[in-house]
Image (tube, helix red, strand yellow):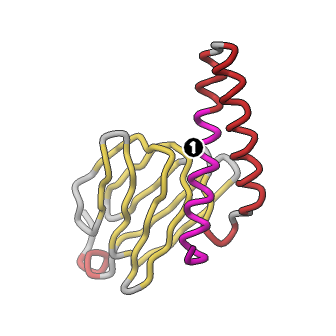
Amino acid sequence: MADETTATHGITVQIVTPAGEVYNESGIDIAVVNTQGGQVGIMAKHVPMLAALTIDELIVKRGNDQESLAVNGGIAEFSNDTLTVVADSAETSDVIDVSRAESAKERAEARLAHAQDDNNDAELRRARIALMRAVNRIHVAALKSGR
């Protein structure tokens, strides 16, 4: 059980990928994750949970500050006022290379069209995932720049 100090000072959010730790902050008021079952807001003393994540934005809020991260699938586990996300990949908005993400989007769109023409279901699925990842990265980067 979390002690009173943790409860009054928010939650800890940790995001790890195969490449290493991407994010680790304490004192977060709320984290909003997009799961396969829908969007979930997590605050101190939230019930323990384990959920599969979608390719989408993860939002962390502390006071008047809000930060968005591009999370590309994975799982979220919450217990003892700590949210741990193990993601396939994740990036904070300030490290996203928008031109690289836009190039990835164009490549994914071309792969998608080619897979549709060939009726290749496996390639169609991979192209859709690549497109969703690229669009997610572009979306999160745009939030940081105010576009």
Q: Residue at x 73, y 44 (%)?
A: 106
Q: Work out whether residue 106 or residue 84 is closer to the camera in this orientation and state it.
A: 106
Which stretch is magenta? Answer: 128-147
- Give the image location of residue 40, x and y in percent: 30, 55
Q: Quadrant of residue 109?
A: top right
Q: Nearer the viewer, residue 8 or 126?
A: 126
Which is more toward the observer, 133 or 91?
133
Q: Position of residue 30 (x, y in %)?
A: 33, 70
- The structure residue drawn at horizontal position 36% and vertical position 85%, both measured from the top left corner, is 63
Could you tell whether 80 is left or right of 16 in the image? left
Q: Amino acid at mark 1?
A: Met
Q: Residue at x 44, y 75 (%)?
A: 26
Which quadrant is home to the C terminus?
Answer: bottom right
**Is residue 46 toward the left or the right of residue 120 in the image?**
left
So how many labels did they put on this image? Answer: 1
Q: Residue furthest top?
A: 119
Query: What's the residue at 33%, 76% (across, down)?
Result: 29
Query: Which of the two residues, 123 or 3, is positioned nearer the viewer here?
Result: 123
Residue 42 in the figure: left or right of residue 132:
left
Question: Can you say whether 46 is above or below 35 in the image?
Answer: below
- In the picture, the quarter occupied by the N terminus is bottom left
Q: Is residue 129 found inside the magenta-colored segment of the image?
A: yes
Question: Is 122 contained in the magenta span?
Answer: no
Q: Which residue is disc 1 drawn over?
A: 132
**Within 10 angstroms of label 1, few (less than 14), some, or many (20 or more) residues?**
some
The kind of secondary structure element at disc 1 is helix
Residue 101 image-quadrant placement: bottom right
Indicate the position of residue 50 as horizontal and vertical percent values: 34, 44
Q: Main secondary structure of the magenta part?
A: helix
Q: Position of residue 65 (x, y in %)?
A: 44, 83
